[in-house]
Amino acid sequence: MLRDTVILRVVVKLLLPAILIFALYVQFHGDYGPGGGFQAGVAAAAAIILYGMVFGIDEAQKVVPRPIVNTMIPLGVLIFAGTGVASLLLGENYLDYSPLGSKPVKGQHLGILIVEAGVFITVASTMLAIFYVFGGRADEADEKEGEG
């Protein structure tokens, strides 16, 4: 763990907001250019993972608690799949977003935003869940090593 490195801790605290804002930019710019929910989710999770690597897993879990992460994974999938089901219920094909708005173009734009939000939530929370599991194992190994 890198808790004793003051410069690194300060730099990480300065970088976190920039990384999260960039993730939001990628999220909302995704339907106009490269990017979208997957890339934005990876960037957002990377910010929290960086924080966890410098300050420890326990501190990272204070920022994004594990129960929230475990809830967000199926919620993102539900948002993605629910958008497709909404299209079906409105008489169109699965994930055909046209009926979601007053005009087909508006519906497609809204549908893409909702689906990308679901992808963002799922990817970010899945990456954090993986980090928490493997990071927790590293802490356990450090504790056992200290005992032995």
Image (spheres, rainbow, N blue to C red):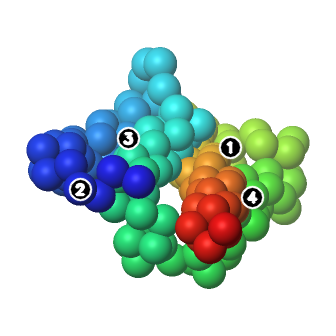
- Element assignment for label 3: helix
For the residues labelled 4 and 3, the Cα–Cα distance comes to 19 Å
Q: Which residue is mark 1?
A: 97
Q: Residues within 10 Å of mark 2 (few under 14, many from 20)?
A: few
**Is 21 above or below relative to 125?**
above
User: In the image, what residue type sits under mark 2?
Assistant: Asp
Q: Which residue is mark 4?
A: 77
In primary-sequence order, the first of circles 2 and 3 is 2
Residue 118 quadrant: bottom right
In primary-sequence order, the first of circles 4 and 2 is 2
Pick the residue in front: 103 or 65: 65
Proximity of marks 4 and 1: CB atoms separated by less than 8 Å: no
For the residues labelled 3 and 1, the Cα–Cα distance comes to 24 Å
Proximity of marks 4 and 3: CB atoms separated by less than 8 Å: no
In primary-sequence order, the first of circles 4 and 1 is 4
Q: Which residue is mark 3?
A: 23
> Measuring 59% from the left and 37% from the top, which residue is drawn there?
38
Q: Is 74 left, or right, of 54 in this rendering?
A: right
**Rendering coords of residue 132 (x, y %):** 61, 62
Q: Which residue is mark 2?
A: 4
